[in-house]
Amino acid sequence: MFEAIQIALSRLELLVFFAPYGPYMPERIADSSTVVQAYALSEELNKWLLFDDTNIKFIGGWREVAASMKEGRHQPSLLFYERV
């Protein structure tokens, strides 16, 4: 079964994921103290971009995304994949 899961995952590519930060509680999503960031892969640039409420920032490769997430203590909460 584990091998089947690995094969299925190898056919998916992560495109976008959301990572809220701040005092995150479902009832406070509309509260301005919770910010949701989105990391998105630009196929055209082959780079990851970071979107927040007011900015778009070039992040770079996956290693830079991981470093940005670690530094900001972000935890992905909603992920979108594409079958390749």
Image (cartoon, rainbow, N blue to C red):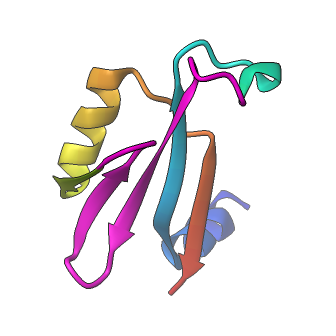
Left-right relation of 39 to 18:
left
Q: Position of residue 20 (x, y in %)?
A: 55, 32
Residue positioned 19% across, 45% down in the render: 64
Count the numbered circles shown.
0
Give above or below for 13 relative to 2.
below
Residue 53 included in the magenta stretch of the image = yes
Point out the stretch of residues depicted in magenta: 30-55
Measured from the top left, where is residue 6 in percent x and y?
57, 64
Q: Residue at x 57, y 69 (%)?
A: 81
Q: Position of residue 72 (x, y in %)?
A: 33, 23
Image quadrant occupied by the N terminus: bottom right
Q: Residue at the top extreme?
A: 23
Q: In the image, 68: left or right of 51?
A: left
In reply to whether residue 3 is colored magenta, the answer given is no
Does 29 appear above or below 50? above
Residue 77 versus residue 48 in the image, above or below: above
Instruction: Name which residue lies at 59% across and 23% down.
Output: 32
Give percent across and percent down for residue 33.
56, 17
- Residue at the extreme right of the image, as rendered: 27
Q: Is residue 55 left or right of residue 36?
A: left
Q: Indicate the quadrant where residue 76 lies.
A: top right
Which residue corresponds to the image point at 19% horizontal and 56% vertical from the top-left? 58
Position of 33 with respect to 68 (left or right) is right
3 or 47: nearer the viewer: 47
